[in-house]
Structures are given as structure tokens and as C-alpha cells.
Image (spheres, coloured by chain):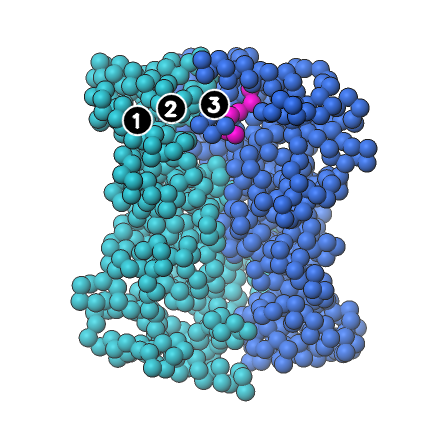
Chain colours: A cyan, B blue
Amino acid sequence: MFILPAQKHGIRQLMILKKPALYTDLYELTMAQGYFLSGRHTQAASFDYFFRKLPFDGGYVVFAGLADFLQSLEDFEFQPEELDYLKTQGFTDEFIDYLKDFEFTGDIYSVKEGEIIFPNEPVLRVEGSILETQILETLLLNTLNFESLIATKAARIKQAAGDKPVVDFGLRRAQGLGGLQASKAAVIGGFKGTSNVLAGMKYGVDISGTMAHSWIQSFEDELTAFRTYAEHYPDSSILLVDTYNTLDIGVPNAIKVAKELEEEGHRLKAIRLDSGDLAYFARKSREMLDEAGLDYVKIAVSNQLDEHLIKSLLDQDAPIDLFGVGTKLVTAYDNPALDGVYKLSSVNERPTLKISENVEKITLPGSKRVVRYFNEDGEFYRDGILLTDEEDITKVVHPYIDFKYTHTESLKKEELQQQVVKNGKRIIDLPAASESAAYAQKRLSQLPREFKRFDNPHIYKVGLSPNLRKLKDELIQQKES
Amino acid sequence: MFILPAQKHGIRQLMILKKPALYTDLYELTMAQGYFLSGRHTQAASFDYFFRKLPFDGGYVVFAGLADFLQSLEDFEFQPEELDYLKTQGFTDEFIDYLKDFEFTGDIYSVKEGEIIFPNEPVLRVEGSILETQILETLLLNTLNFESLIATKAARIKQAAGDKPVVDFGLRRAQGLGGLQASKAAVIGGFKGTSNVLAGMKYGVDISGTMAHSWIQSFEDELTAFRTYAEHYPDSSILLVDTYNTLDIGVPNAIKVAKELEEEGHRLKAIRLDSGDLAYFARKSREMLDEAGLDYVKIAVSNQLDEHLIKSLLDQDAPIDLFGVGTKLVTAYDNPALDGVYKLSSVNERPTLKISENVEKITLPGSKRVVRYFNEDGEFYRDGILLTDEEDITKVVHPYIDFKYTHTESLKKEELQQQVVKNGKRIIDLPAASESAAYAQKRLSQLPREFKRFDNPHIYKVGLSPNLRKLKDELIQQKES
């Protein structure tokens, strides 16, 4: 699939969006001005990022977007022309003056990029003044929600493909410029590479590609088209065989060219099937290639693939070596948004919560952390949400139901969050996509298979420390009374 | 909804992606190198952009993305560090030298941004050398597919909302940086504005916003939170009333603040409902506001809205004045990709087509244009796809079925495409979002209502000229024989 080695000249985490301060909802700025003008902007605040509902009816989410978010935080400053624009929108001179020198000076704690996370866990926490913590909301959500969504979809697709490589071909149907992040998140989730050249350059991920039908149509006949391509890419050609007729024309022509390449000491890399019944055509093509002594020529397939189709193809023993996945991956077609939110959990040391008409939307108060407990086999067993200022606990309890809890004393455990930003300065290296991908694979291997099932996966249990549960219940009482 | 006037200091069509040449699939570049090294790169070629399947089970698509695509075409050049990167990926020095001075020098013909378009119509045509026309493919598809998709979704939502304004609140759940284009496309489709500040600045569209729950939680009580906001935004406040309890706490507090504003000569603009049964809460809130003499205070609602929910709310006579729509709009949630493709139709004056295992994927050969025919009421009646070099025709025929055709002699008609780029230079002004929006509304008013229905819309007929049909049939015969 013309898979090229990863770029070696260092990791480039540059966002397309160099100065992202205005990539935000207007209300972040009107609230910020309100805090500022009423002299409340320096109040200490803590916000949590978490999601509520697992996408794809799945059992887990792969956390991604941290590197891009931290990068954009470093570039978070208001440009002169942006301030001019805000002036035309009615913001006061006093506030615009304040924004001129704005920079984030708070602290951020986060789980690692590539971590496996579950609903309602505060996986990232931002602490600082109410103004600086609020003003990051939209950018943070936009980045983490989307990259986590795609990394999760990619992990599911990779899971279906097993040890066969999967490559992202989705840029043409991606949601505009979001395609850059989609390609990166695909790699974090387990994809071998992407067709997206800019993602290759900016994130140091492998890029790959085959050929389009137009290449073949531009020649008088398919054989000449194949020959010409093979001449220029004698060891990396993947010939697209379905332009006119797959089995009668395409595969025989590919075999002819493969034989010619052999004479020159080269090897055709693969053929690609992009339409029709992929299982049938793969089987027939494999037979034809093998009969011609070309058992080394691989079969790549594409065309509206997702985890379910790939699973079905492999369940049918279709002899496929490589999968190209596009639209269904890069748009997360069957569930195109992760519902992650960013909620205030304390202000001036006072824990806060939001009571909702919908019970499951009641938020968790106070500054919190996440602890993961492991079973004897070293697999994930339970997660607990604890207050940051409490010591070790002996049990985690159900968020609502009193008689449900888990003893944790004898369990191995890990703190999931680490500090990543201190007084506004990043204190970790930005993780490369390849590092986050390796971490995600490691963590997925620690997740019991029941949670990875596509149909009705088991629900992973996330409990609260008894102190947190008590705090939450007391605050609800207060607000309701 | 704190709707601010559109920016007056000129239209800014800047893309975030300043130099987009590498925002492409690798195979565009490997094919380009193949054409170049085999000396075939200067062959004349013509490519068509068209889509095949109507999204949302709807009856039409609103064409968008032209301005952004034309802008990115002007910025299409390879940067030195990009060429260095391509060198690390195995491209030859000779080809990289060629790319150094690459610029598009061909011609582009397109329907207007905001045009109503239908499946299989070649709405945009690129002519030039095979290399320069091929190399634009991915960027073109990425831009036109996504913006057309969102403009179409926005038009449907606006249709449901009738004369009530609809505003885009989706940035936090948008697919990463694609959110910038989503906000613009929303306006092209009929939205009044967006919360997205960067879209406001770059595209000159109205921006608007309300307040977050965190604003209210950060105060000791909701009333103080409302009062403080109203103090700073005495004539544009929209108070979010569902943080603790909508009818018992939120609305009564909003009424108190509205009365206080009245005493100072100001008016509360609106309240916002963001959870629970929106029809019920809107009705109850309206009663409470009216009883308090606040019939001018509007009711805004948000929370997972789309065209179907809005239609349902208005069918129930819910007294809602403003809709905020987020995730379902900006991700086109129920159909998150448009299947637009870019297909070679001729090379060196030789018409080409692609035969597929799927009949409906056979492409139309030759350089083509689109003509729209109108009925006596000035409404859209039929579209015809003609060869560019043929004169007026007397009938359009069905793409496959011989006895189906329409006489066109007596019908008023319009050529839909105009030349927009000549010898690589843009020859039209970039349309502002507001202009494309006005054009889309005008054209939607010419589309009979049967095609705008949400359930089982009527299928708009697009035929071929007899010459085109004949050319296609002959080429299929040739390839099959």
C-alpha cells in the first residue's frame, strides 16, 4: 500500500490553527468579560472534562487530543486583528486591554493520551482563575471530543482487523479541516498509517496510498496504465483492478505486470479491490494470483468498510491482507460526536454541582482524581473517582445505589491523572502519535475482552469514594431545599 | 441571543489552512509523479465533481464550499519544508523541483455557491493538464463535500423553523477544525448566525451567545448570577434558567431580574431552556412571563435539536422564539458525509468513463454542462446534462431507460455553470457567506415543495442530452467488448 517509513526528522505537533484563541463560542468571551468587569475574574475555579455516553454502543473510549490541546494552549493568545474584531462586536476597551496580555497561568491534570476511559470520569482537570479556566472550554471540548471519538472508532476497526494492517483513506469525506486530526487520531487508535500527507508531516505518522481509477482511465488501456505505474514504483505498486472488469480484465493484467516485474527482479506489492462483493472477489483473485505463482502479492480492499464489515469479511475467511478505511472512520459515521463536557466543580474552594432535570446529568462536585484498580491478572477491574485531598480509601461506592460497592484494599491500583501543566507551563513532553498509539494498545490489552465486544459489551464499573458520594448528596439536599 | 451585527470591515475569506497543498491523499502525489516521469503530465484532462446519493433521505443538496475552495486554490503552493518532507518520503529530486514552481493554470466552471443541486450532476468541472487537475482532487472533495453537507442540513433545519431564527451552537462537538467550515456552511444554509467567533471574524457572519451553567454555579445563588450578567449586558441578556430548577427557581429569578431591568429602562432579551421537555417548559415559562407583563421576553431553546424535533415543537405550538442547534447540525449527525466524487471525463479530447460492478457508479463521459429547465410558474422542472460543445437540444432523456424523456423546446432554461477560474486565475469575486445564503434562499423558493418534504420527498429528474446518452452507451459497448 505504498506504506512509507515514518518521518524521521522529529515530531511535529504544529496545529494548523496557529493562534486558536478565537476558535471559541462567543459566550466564553461574554462571560469572561462579565467576570472581569464585576471583579470576580480571579476567583479560583476547577473544571472537569468527562463524557457521559459511550459511542458506537461500545464498552470504552480511547482518550486522544491531549497533545494537540496542549500545543494549542501554548499558542493561546489574542492577535491584534482579533482584538480589533472583538471591539467591533461590542466588547469594552478595558476588557480588550486585559485580553492583550492574556495567557493561561493555571494547572492541568490529565490521564495519558491513549488511556482507556469510561463515562463520568473526570479524565482531565483544569485549575486556575475562573476567567482563564472558563475561556478554554470550547477549544478543549472541540479537540478532545473529536480526537477521542476517532481514536475509539479506529481502535474498534483495528480490533476487527486483528493482525492485518488498517490504513486511513478518509480525507476526501472528512469533515473539512477536521480531517487532519482524524488521521492522527486513527493512528492513536491503532491504524498503521494514513493517506493524509499533511498528517504525515505534522504528526510523523506513516503515509500510504495506491492509485485512482483516473490513472487507469487516462491511458488507452489498463495494461499500459499498470505497466507505467509499476515502472516508476517497481516495489511498492498496488494496482487497482476494478476499473473495467475485476476478474476478466483487472486481475489478469495485474498478473501480467507482476510477471514482468519478476523478470526485472522486482515484486508487485498488491492489488486493490474497491467495489463489488469483496469476499468473493478476494477469494477469486487469490486463486488466480496463487495459480500464477504470485502468492506474495497481497490483496488490499476498500469501499465503505467499518469494524462490522471487516469482521464479517474475516469471519468468511476472505483472503485479505490490508484494509483501507475511509468515511466510516474519519466521520465516526454511526456516531459522529462524543458528548464530552467541561463542568465547573469548585469555585473559591466551594464545591459546586449542577442539578439537571435529567438525573444522569447531575455533576460531581469538588476537585477530583481517578484511580484504577486491577484484578489478580493485572486487568482493569474498577475505577474510582476520589477527591484530590483524600487519602487512600477502602471501598468505592455506586453513584446512586447504597448497597452496591467494591472493597479496594487488597487491589493493586494506579493514579490515572498526572500534572501536565503547572502555572501555565507544560511540564511533560508532548506525546507523539506513535507513543500514544503504543500506550493505547498496551491498555487495551489490559481491558478484559467482555468490554471490547461489539454487541452488548459488559459495562465497566466506575464508583465514587464514600466522601465524594457524601459531598454530592449533601449538596443536592442543600440546593433542593 | 446576544446576536451581534455582522462584521462591517469587509469580507474575510481566509482559510485557517493557509498553504493547503499537502492536505491531500498521498496517491495524488504518486500519480502526479508517475505522469511527470513518464512525460504524460501535460495531457489535457477534464474532471467532474458530483455526488450520487442525497443525504438525510432528502430531496436536494445546497452547494457550498466554492469560496473556500477557490481561496485555497490561490494558496496552493508547496512550501520548502513540505518539499523536504516529500523528499524523505521517496519522491524524486526531478519531481520535487517541478513542484517548487507548481501552480494551477487550468480552468474551472461551477454552479454558484448556494445553488440547489441533485445527484449525478457535474456541478463543477476542472480542465487543465492531467497533473494539475488530478492533484486538486482531495482538497476539492474535502471542502465541497463537507460544506455542501452542512449547508444542506442547515437548510432543512431552517425550513422546519420557518420564520424563527436558528443559530449554530455546535463548535464544542464539531469534528475538530472542521467546525470553522461548519459554522460558515450553516449560514449559507439559512442560519441567522453562529456562536463560533473565528467564523464570525473570518467569514463576516453574525455571532451570538448566551451563558453557561458554570456562570450561574460560580455565584452563591442564581439570582445574583442573573443580576450580575444583566448589569453588564442590560439589553442583550439571555438567562439560562435550568441550572437548579426551571419553573420553581430559574424562571422566577429571571422575572425578578427583568423587572429590575425595566426600572432602569432596559429589557431582558430572553430566557433559555436547555433540558427537560422543551414544549412543556416553554409553555409554562411563557405563561409565567406573560402573567408578569413580560410578553416581550423571548424564549430560546437548545438541547439536541434537529429539523425533526423543531418541527415537532412547532407542531405542538410550543411558544419558542429562537432555536440554538449544535451537534446535530455541525456533524450532520444522521448522515455525516456527502458522497461527492471527482471523476475523469476526458483525456486528450478522448471521453472516458469508469465501468463499475455497481451500475449506478458508471460515470458520464466527455466535457459536460448542466442546464435547468423551469415550469410555467418559474419553478425548477427538470435538469439536463449536456455536452459542452453541443447546441440547444429538444429533449432530455433518461440515463438508462429508453422510453423516458422530456421535451424541452418550450421550457425556459438557465445554464447553471459559469467559468470561475481561467488560466489559473479566479475571474469571479469570492461570494460572501451572506450572498450565498441569499442565493440559496431564492433558489429554495423556486424548488417545488414536494422536493422539500422530510418524508419520502419527490425525486427531481435529471436527464441527459441524447448525444451524451449515445456517447455513454457507445463507450460502455467498447469497454465491454
> First in sequence: mark 2 or mark 1?
2
Tell me the crowding category of disc 1: few under 14, some 14 to 19, or many 20 or more residues within 10 angstroms, Cα based. Answer: many
Residue furthest right in the image: B376
Nearest the viewer among B12 and B37 is B37
User: SS at mark 1?
Assistant: helix
Q: Is residue A194 above or below residue A436?
A: above
Nearest the viewer among B412 and B437 is B412
Question: Are the residues under marks 3 and 2 on the same chain?
Answer: no
Q: Residue B245 falls in which quadrant of the image?
A: bottom right
Q: Chain of mark 1?
A: A
Q: Which residues are magenta?
A: B360-365
Residue located 33% across and 78% down the image: A404
Q: Is residue B400 visible?
A: yes
* Main secondary structure type of the part rendered in magenta: loop
Pointer 2 with pointer 1, Cβ within 8 A: yes
Residue B397, label in figure: none
Q: Which residue is mark 2?
A: A246
Residue B355, label in figure: 3
Q: Which residue is mark 1?
A: A285
Quadrant location of the C terminus of chain A?
Answer: bottom right
Residue furthest bottom in the image: A481
Q: Chain of mark 3?
A: B
Q: Chain of mark 2?
A: A
Tell me the crowding category of disc 3: few under 14, some 14 to 19, or many 20 or more residues within 10 angstroms, Cα based. Answer: many
Q: Is residue B441 visible?
A: no
Q: Is residue B194 above or below residue B141?
A: below
Residue located 30% across and 26% down the image: A285
Mark 3–mark 2 distance (CA, rounded to whole Å)? 10 Å
The image shows residue B47 at horizontal and vertical percentages of 54, 23
Mark 3–mark 1 distance (CA, rounded to whole Å)? 19 Å
Q: Is residue B385 left or right of residue B334?
A: right
